[in-house]
Image (cartoon, rainbow, N blue to C red):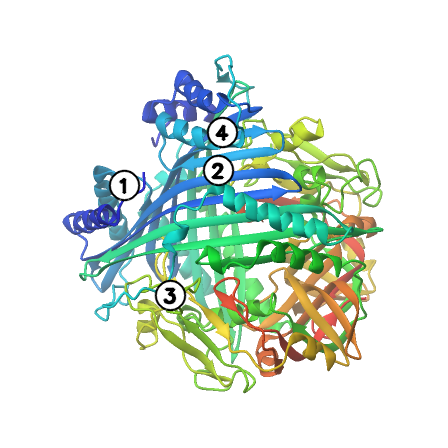
Amino acid sequence: MSASQQEMEAVVQHALESAARAGASQTDVLLVEGDDREVRVRGDEIEFVKQAQERGLGIRALVDGKEGRQTSIVSTSDLAPDAVARMAEEAVALARATAADPTAGLPDAGFATDLPDLGLFDPADQNVALDARIEDAKRAEAAARDFDPRIDNSEGSQASSGHARVVYGNSQGFLGSYASASHGLFAEPLAREGDSMQRDYWMTSARRLADLEDAAAVGRKAAERAIRRLGGKRVETCEVPVIFDGMTAPSLIGQLASCASGYSVYRESTFLGDKLGESIAASAVTIIDDGRLPGGLGSKPFDGEGQPTRRNVLVDNGVLKTWLLDTYSGRKLDLPSTGSAARGTGSAPRVGTTNLWLEPGEQTLDEMIGELDRGLVVTELIGMGFNPTTGDYSRGAAGLWVEKGEVVHPVEEITIAGNFGDMLQSIDRIGSELVWRGRTAAPPLRIASMTLAGE
Amino acid sequence: MSASDPTETSADRALDFFRDRFDLDDSSLAAALDTALERQVDYADLYFEYTTTDSVSLEEGIVKSGDRHLEQGVGVRAVRGERQGYAHSDDISVESARLAAGTARAIADETREHAPVAVSTGAAGHDLYPIATAPTDVPVATKVDWLNEIDAYARAKSPKVSQVMASVVCQHKHTLVAASNGTRVADVLPLVRVNVQVLAADGSRREVGYQGAGGRFELEEMRDPSRWQGLVDEAVRIALLNLEAEACPAGAMDVVLGPGWPGILLHEAIGHGLEGDFNRKKTSAFSDKMGQRVAAEGVTVVDDGTIPGRRGSINVDDEGTPSKRNVLIENGVLVGYMQDRLNAELMGVEPTGNGRRESYAHLPLPRMTNTFMLAGEDDPQDILESVEDGLYAVSFGGGQVDITSGKFVFSASEAYRIEGGRIGRPVKGATLIGNGPDVLTRVTRIGHDLALDEGVGTCGKDGQGVPVGVGLPTIRVNDLTVGGTEG
């Protein structure tokens, strides 16, 4: 069922031509085809095996209105030529029903001309046997269960492998394509002791199977994390330094990037609104978004509008250097696109990150704990208590309580709160360990003081 | 497809739809199931879906875009013991279903002889959301005009309103389930939702207010000005209120939750923990607590998928089981879990009509529908006056739970201090955290004012989102940790 690149490009061309015939002044088309396999093992049993081939076609049609262009997005999985032509006509009719927007439109120029090989898949992985991935999940699950007798249950260990091809074309003459893969392994064991039952997880993901962490190591780390949460308790409400570990720190960087999105800026819904060029974080903080990192899980040769991806230094030594922009939000702010358009088949372009990270520092996490007199290491965050407009931050947390440089007991049922702007300014330690588990990575980092609510 | 025979139920219309459009009749469904059943499997099912979604959104006073999405496909599942094979295709046809069945059955190695399966209509389900006009058939121009009215109305409310974002999202979903036990059930599910978000500015301070509403009914119901103007009024009121709000206190205190949407407490604190899969696997903090006291006397919690027109309601679940009103906690005692077929079978109980999935591309899981606490007898004003020093939380954003430890959080979008039994200053950014298995044991007062939410909830589990509802009367909960910044 999988179509060749040429066949996919022909579908995109047909959609572009159909929209033009129906009266669109500009059109762009995104076609994605993928196959995915997923397997979960729990204990000795396979819990599920899931396989699918999927495809999606998204057409954005623009028609000329009185004072700008009118826009619509339609999507379908039906790629039959007459169905595609019908969808294109529907898109044009839908666009005519919306209002004209003087800012709407495709990029005028600057489309990607070089499409470098970014190492987004390994041909050797193309035909990976399902059994091999089942084996990985079984090894992770067994390693977790064998780690300690207190690991007596689990939510299972899950392995996944997916391949996708993206074709994007527009009426400005750009047509590009790339193939990518992503593989993952995830283990989530349960530890039990007395009345206390805890779960935790560990995961690895990569473009190449060979780059995944060893399956047994994934299981062991997940088990170690679950065990150390046993006996967790609340602590008294206080203000203390808080260390985010390598699993929780990336969420802070992701939140910062969303607050630097051009859309948040022109909608006045970010606390960073008037701070471009100013110091917004401690001077040791440098944050980069690079869409062309070889083998990166967020890498792609061009963005959702055909603009070349690139390296954007978002924060340089504490100073906010740029917004992240696609064409639309860039025009709103009189700035060029930063190649940050993200696009799904069913949505208009918006701003997204690619490979986003915080530059590591010198200290290991153990050293950071060793010099902490009294405070918290956050190993898991729950809830969505972050308001990007005001920077108000308050989330549920679990972690480890540290006194005089030693972990003394696990902590749970607490919240940590502060103002995000103040939190960024008071990052006073940055760890050395930078591990990629997704598109966003950060080493452990310490915030000098946050309000911890507990008993 | 716009006008339909009013004597036909949703089930009839969906069966006609799949037969007329895709040639799916009883014999072709049986043929596809046969492919799965050639192996040694206990059970197999097919789930066909054809969903149209459209959304129109406004910002900066302009309806900038109209979207229309078609999602169609078939998911085929083969079950053997605890093991499930699943394959799906985005093509609706018997051939695609057979191909997927060939993949799904790979969880079982042994072939077998089997009697041909016959599918026939299942038990008569409900007809909870009959409509004459699909919301996706309402002209886009009507929705555009309406959004412009919403924008003008919101901006006229206060000079402090600096941005208005509004959207109308409509969905019309056809489903068809055929299973090896002979079940053949179909449904048509409408779903509408209106969202209004307002940014209010005062000097350099900016705050957001949001209100949404919706359900499974005709879009026309929402277009009544008394209905949508109330939404806008709320969004503006909350944004302006938050301009005045102070930092929230931190620490354990007594909390009064208002009626309606604060029922998200139940969803997070106990709802997920009572889903059958976690309890079969004994990974829930509620495992093995059946028959035990998990809440204070007087606390009765139900999950009810049968309320007409509600966002969380379903005529049948996504495995063909009719929805039910399931009592989870009765007068403080745990009496029921929510089940899909697989977990019910493995636990030796009946399915409860809670087997739901996001789409044909997902495996069904035990999921909530509309989860709420029954009303008590207390006067809400008396409940507030009973608290000397605490927090009154009226509306919430999202929440999350760790099933295993039982710890849950939810974040308030409108909250006040309670000082000397009176509602005091508004506070912002309050996140509440607690322990599911014991939080309801500390409910000391239950109001007579049960309300269900406005119809905007989406629950996420295993990466799948499904529409749900919640509800609560005013209640008092003692000693809940409030996560603000003021120590």
Q: Give the percent coordinates (x, y) of residue A135.
A: 56, 45
Report the residue marked by disc 3.
B60
Q: Nearer the viewer, mark 4 or mark 3?
A: 4
Q: Is mark 3 on a helix, strand or loop?
A: loop
Residue drawn at (78%, 50%) of the image: A149
The chain letter for the residue carrying disc 2 is B
**Picture quadrant where residue A323 is located:** bottom left
Q: What residue type is labelled 2?
A: Phe
Which of the two discs, 2 and 4, labels the residue nearer the N terminus? 4
> CA gap, disc 4 to disc 3?
52 Å
- Kindly check if marks 3 and 2 are in contact, taking CB atoms under 8 A apart as contact: no
> CA gap, disc 2 to disc 4?
38 Å
Left or right: where does residue A115 sit relative to residue B252? left
Q: Is mark 4 on a helix, strand or loop?
A: helix
Tag 4 and tag 3 share a subunit: yes
Report the residue marked by disc 4.
B105
